[in-house]
Amino acid sequence: MKYDIVIIGGGPAGLSFAASMIDANVKVLLLERSDIDAIANPKEDGREIALTHLSVKILKKLKIWSLIDQSQVSPLKEAKVFDGDSPPLLNFKPDQKGIDALGYLVPNYLIRKALYDRVNDAQNIDLVTDSLVKDVKQGDSSSTVMLNSGENINTKLVVAADSRFSEIRRKVGIPTLMKDFSKVMIITKMKHEKSHNNTALECFDYGKTFALLPMVGDASSIVITVKTNESQNMLDMPEEEFNNFVTEFFKGEFGKMTQDGTRHSYPLIGTHAQAFVAKRFALIGDASVGMHPVTAHGFNLGLRGQNVLANLVQDALAHGQDIGSESLLKLYQKKHINLTRLMFFGTNGIVALFTNDAPVIKQVRRFVLKFAENFPPIKYIISHHLTEAKENKFLPF
Ligand SMILES: Cc1cc2nc3c(=O)[nH]c(=O)nc-3n(C[C@H](O)[C@H](O)[C@H](O)COP(=O)(O)OP(=O)(O)OC[C@H]3O[C@@H](n4cnc5c(N)ncnc54)[C@H](O)[C@@H]3O)c2cc1C
């Protein structure tokens, strides 16, 4: 069997790009190392993905949004940022008339399930699980994808979506910047007595960071970032003690808070590939940029990037051009890499500032938040960025 495109990795990015190719005149192979159950019936993993309006627009275009159980989608109407025990120093609301939310929180496993269901139905896509890609050899007119099983597959374009620790990126020789934050995020769902009013809270405390992401009903995803050597204690803390710890942190604002799920942990390592393309090869999703989750941009950037690449491939097909040409791939990189660099280094800068508890820096932290609150262009840029649904206006500059 000959394939026009081979996608490596059946995570959210790889499946999104496959979904983008459903109506195109191409034969696509998607290879995933996990077994079918992990992809077809993904388990709850604690991640609540905050989607921007552009992401929702792309998911609607791909006919995936309607496959997500809408009763589990929680609109994010407001966001507040705190520093230490300060009152809210920075507040965000939608800036445009007719827009009721900054974004939408959707459980990650529901997004993955919807993506799988859509791709699995497609006639032009073969999805093969239990299939580990070992290497890629690039040629002038085609590339060869080499499987662990010994099988080799020839294709015009290889798209790697094999995670932020992409082995294939390394084998193809693309250098990557890695930032180890030496912190771990612990996430769990908690029920509470009082409403969250669909408001997200980001609390840059000293030593720890807490976030509350409003889920459907009187429930929230609680995200606690701690030093790596404190994470096991936080994971092992008896439930009653954990409930009291979180309830007290929020000063009883939500009444008694009760854990309603498993505690999940994620070590924090950010990555940014120095190039997104090589000969007949493109990186998408976390394989191109693996963000620190604090600004909730990983999958949003992944969706945008695959959309940029998919549009260029569709355009080349419409004009009878080569879908793996150097000019197409360079254009993809040009349209996406500057934005991801800005988001990656901007986010890392925020993390560096708001996790530094030196007395002088604490003053700077408060000054920065107060300045941002009282300087309308900054708030406009951030709110606009979340609610803008046009790809070329992802940022208004
Ligand atoms: C705690 C947390 C909260 C987050 N919150 C948000 C948020 O609010 N908003 C947001 O936009 N993003 C968020 N993200 C980021 C988002 O979850 C990721 O960006 C997204 O899951 C990345 O998808 P991906 O498909 O690129 O990579 P992955 O999900 O890592 O998938 C990679 C796939 O490739 C497969 N694979 C790897 N190597 C091979 C190989 N050699 N051969 C075959 N298959 C292979 C793997 O098995 C896997 O299935 C969050 C992340 C975390 C950790």
Image: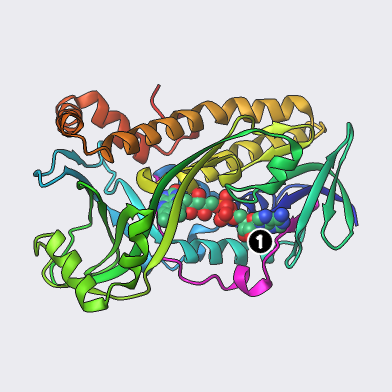
Q: Position of residue 249 (x, y in %)?
A: 15, 60
Residue 121: quadrant of the picture: bottom right
Query: Which quadrant: the C terminus?
Result: top left
Q: Position of residue 211 (x, y in %)?
A: 26, 54
Residue 172: quadrant of the picture: top right
Q: Does the rendering let one see residue 12?
A: no
Q: Say whether residue 358 is left or right of residue 325.
A: left
- Per the rendered image, the range of residues in magenta is 27-52
Q: Residue at x 55, y 67 (%)?
A: 113
Q: Does the rendering let one see residue 90?
A: yes
Q: Say whether residue 316 is left or right of residue 70.
A: right
| Label 1 beta carbon less than 8 Å to ligand 1 | no
Q: Position of residue 229 (x, y in %)?
A: 36, 57
Q: Residue at x 20, y 26 (%)?
A: 376
Query: For this rendering, which residue is in front, 373 or 331?
Result: 373
Residue 132 among those drawn in magenta? no
Residue placed furthest toward the top: 397
Q: Say whether residue 35 is left or right of residue 381.
A: right
Q: Say whether residue 138 is left or right of residue 16.
A: right
Which residue, given by chain and number where applicable, does mark 1 sit on? 119
Q: Can you say whether 207 is above or below 251 in the image?
A: above
Q: Position of residue 88 (x, y in %)?
A: 13, 43
Q: Can you say whether 63 is above or below 67 in the image?
A: above
Query: Which quadrant: the N terminus?
Result: bottom right
Q: Can you say whether 338 is above or below 27 in the image?
A: above
Three-letter code, disc 1? Val
